[in-house]
Amino acid sequence: MAALPQELGDLIESMNAAGEVRTETIGRREYHVGIAHGVPCVVTLARVGKVAAAATASALIHVFGGECHWCSPAWPAACAPTCV
């Protein structure tokens, strides 16, 4: 989760280089789901401020779950080796 677009640029490029990136729009936020540096992740731009960060973090947990995504059936099988 980032406050400024510049903070996400390289990470999203890394995710694109690793393979398919799925973008989901929820509310006024775009959530980029993919793999970065071998780790499944969801990245988004929260915008600046405590309220924006809290609302975005809440949406991340609500929509994508707050559990280990290595074990989550929502992630592609190729992304789920073994949870340690």
Image (tube, helix red, strand yellow):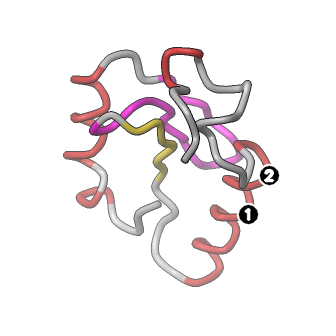
* Residue at the disc numbered 1: 58
Residue 36 falls inside the magenta stretch? yes
* Residue at the disc numbered 2: 62
> Percent from the top left, x then y, of residue 7?
27, 60
Residue 83 falls inside the magenta stretch? no
Work out whether residue 38 or residue 36 is closer to the camera in this orientation and state it.
Answer: 38
Left/right placement of residue 12 relative to residue 35 reads left
Q: How many other residues sit within 10 Å of disc 1, few (<14), some (14-19) or many (≥20)?
A: some
> Percent from the top left, x then y, of residue 57?
65, 64
Give the amino acid type for the residue marked by disc 2 in the picture: His
x 71%, y 51%: residue: 67
Q: The magenta stretch spans which residues?
A: 22-37
x 58%, y 37%: residue: 70
Report how far apart the C-alphas of labels 2 and 1 lie in the structure: 6 Å
In this rendering, the answer to whether 12 lies above or below 77 is below
Give the amino acid type for the residue marked by disc 1 in the picture: Ser
**The label number, if any, that marks residue 74 in the structure image:** none
The single residue placed furthest to the right in the displayed view is 62
